[in-house]
Image (spheres, helix red, strand yellow):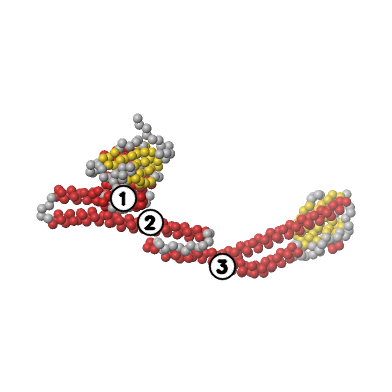
Amino acid sequence: MLGTIGVTLILLAAVLVLGVVWRRTLLANVRQATALRSRDIAALVERGTVPDPVPVAGRDEALVQIVGPDREIIAASANARQHPALALPRPEPGATTVSRVGSLPVDDDEAGFQVAASTVQTAAGPTTVFVATSLEDVTDTIAEARALALTALPLVLLPLCAALWLLVGRTLAPVAAITAEAREISASHLHRRVPQPRRRDEIGLLADTLNRMLSRLEAASTRQRRFVADAAHELRSPIANLRTQLETARGSQRVDWLSTSGDLLATTLRMQRLSDQLLLLARLDGAGLAPRRRAVDLDDVVAVVLARGYDCHGLEIDVSALSPVQLLADPTLVEHAVGNLIDNAVRHARSRLRIVTASGDHTAMVTVEDDGHGIPPDRRDHVVRPFARLDEARDRGGGGAGLGLTIAGDIAAAHGGRLSIGDSDLGGAAVRIELRRVSGELDLKRG
């Protein structure tokens, strides 16, 4: 409806503007022709060859008068010879003026007249030539054109509005379908998609963008539900262990509180570590943790992590391949990632692990290798997912929560790098994090 009204108003405005422009053009043509006729007759007056009576040029030319210095009529058209001279201003010799008058002695045309006055210098003195042209034809032409436009406008407007109505309705029909489907999609129905038209126009692009957004929302919702379910599952075991120990202690007359408190403390620390990892993983996954970069020595980070002490069960830790590598990174996050790699290797190694630091043109790398069972190529993408583990036989002491490699990979990604898993020449797995180096960083050369 609004489109139809808009088209109607535009057409009406166009007709009005066209009428005004056309009227001005016709008046300008009459004005120019009248002035030219006046100058031509004035040239004859200068040469003394003007006829008397002066012939009228065409039916629109109302009269011609040649008025002498004393306002006497020297010559005129046949219809103006017996009438007094026109009481109009006379221009200076050599000049021509055009004015509009409402009536003349010889005619009382309601449309009015254009009167051109040209003055020339003769032996008798300044002589003025008046030429009057009727505007009746201009007025009649405009009136006929206006009537024709008003008659033709409905004939043009009705089919045009009908075609516009059908075109707009057909064009916007997909938008109505998209809107209706979008209203029905809720958090529990993210698998649904809005209808996508076949044509690749703006509406098709909009539908495709909405469907891509819904796919991302569905994937994010699925990850969130899986994450919550896995986190709840991981917390059930230590909570159940705590409850069992406390119920056993309450029901026993003789309790070794020193031993019991040690077990409870170990379980509590495990829960605290798990909750810390869950919080860090959630912050990394939500892009809410921006690295605070400053100068970091990777070999010093490895030394700090190893100084915390690990229950290595007699494992040999080879650090001979550590080299001084410096970059701009968040030291806390890098330390956390390296610690997760070492913790993973300690739990999986049989007798030996090796830590290597190195640098490339644009990356700094930390690789932790072990001589355990390794990670099969078809499982390497699996083990970096949250709460993912290989078989329990690989886990020393029951294993962790399956978050270490996931967090290390997210920390590497936050630094523009990645986590990769390969085979070690020790016989086990080689887990590496690559951290992107900011332009201008240099290796720390130490003698």
Q: In the rendered image, is residue 186 in sight?
A: no
**SS label for mark 2:** helix
Q: Quadrant of residue 363?
A: top left
The amino acid at mark 1 is Leu
The amino acid at mark 2 is Ala
Residue at the (76%, 58%) spot, across then down: 30
Residue extending farthest to the top is: 447
Cα distance in 3D space between marks 1 and 3 = 59 Å
Residue 168 falls left or right of residue 430: right
Residue at the (83%, 58%) spot, across then down: 65
Q: Quadrant of residue 85?
A: bottom right
* Residue 113 picture location, percent across and down: 76, 61
Assess whether mark 1 and mark 2 are in contact (beta carbons under 8 angstroms): no
**SS label for mark 3:** helix
Q: Which mark is residue 166?
A: 3
Q: Which mark is residue 220?
A: 2
The answer to which of marks 1 and 3 sits earlier in the sequence is 3
Quarter of the C terminus within the rendering = top left
The answer to which of marks 2 and 3 sits earlier in the sequence is 3
Front label number (2 vs 1): 1
Question: How would you rate the neighbour count of disc 1 (Cα within 10 Å): few for under 14, some for 14-19, many for 20 or more?
Answer: many
Cα distance in 3D space between marks 2 and 1 = 18 Å
Q: Which mark is residue 14?
A: none
Front label number (1 vs 3): 1
**Please, is residue 327 above or below residue 39 in the view?**
above
Q: In the rendered image, is residue 73 in sight?
A: yes
* Residue 353 picture location, percent across and down: 29, 42
Q: Which mark is residue 403?
A: 1
* Residue 171 picture location, percent across and down: 54, 64
